[in-house]
Image (spheres, helix red, strand yellow):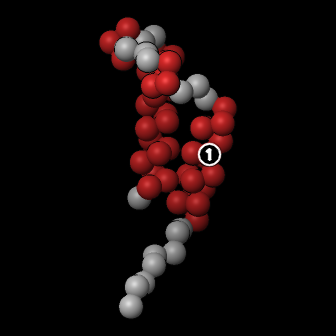
Amino acid sequence: MVIFATPTLSMMFYRILAKINKAVLPSFTKKGLDPAKASKLQLAIIGWRYYVTTRALD
């Protein structure tokens, strides 16, 4: 018997937000950006995407 956990409201919010981020924000890994040479704005976008992705997967 397999029991699936139902996603909470916050998880659903972060999943939707992750899809919006994927559509709107640039993907720096596809562009081959070196994190050591990234600007402050690029680092902030990377951090934001990481934060939202980890919350969507929990």
Residue 43: x percent and y percent? Answer: 44, 21
Asked if residue 36 lies left or right of residue 55, the reply is left
Identity of the residue furthest to the bottom in this view: 1
Q: Quadrant of residue 50?
A: top left
Q: Nearer the viewer, residue 2 or 14?
A: 2
**Residue 44 in view of the camera:** no
Identity of the residue furthest to the left in this view: 36
Q: Is residue 28 above or below residue 39?
A: below
Give the amino acid type for the residue marked by disc 1 in the picture.
Answer: Lys
Q: Quadrant of residue 25?
A: top right
Q: What residue is rendered at 49% in x and 24% in y?
A: 30
Q: Is residue 44 above or below residue 56?
A: above
Quadrant placement of the C terminus: bottom left
**Residue 8 in view of the camera:** yes
- Mark 1 secondary-structure assignment: helix
Q: Is residue 31 above or below residue 10?
A: above
Tag 1 residue: 19
Residue 39: x percent and y percent? Answer: 45, 10
Label 1 Cα crowd, 10 Å radius (few <14 / some 14-19 / many 20+): few
Q: How many marks?
A: 1
Q: Nearer the viewer, residue 23 or 51?
A: 23
Asked if residue 20 lies left or right of residue 34, the reply is right
Q: What residue is rendered at 43% in x and 31% in y?
A: 47
Residue 57: x percent and y percent? Answer: 44, 55
Residue 52: x percent and y percent? Answer: 49, 44
Q: What residue is rendered at 45% in x and 25% in y?
A: 29
Q: Is residue 52 above or below residue 28?
A: below
Q: What residue is rendered at 49% in x and 53% in y?
A: 56
Asked if residue 9 lies left or right of residue 4, the reply is right
Quadrant placement of the N terminus: bottom left
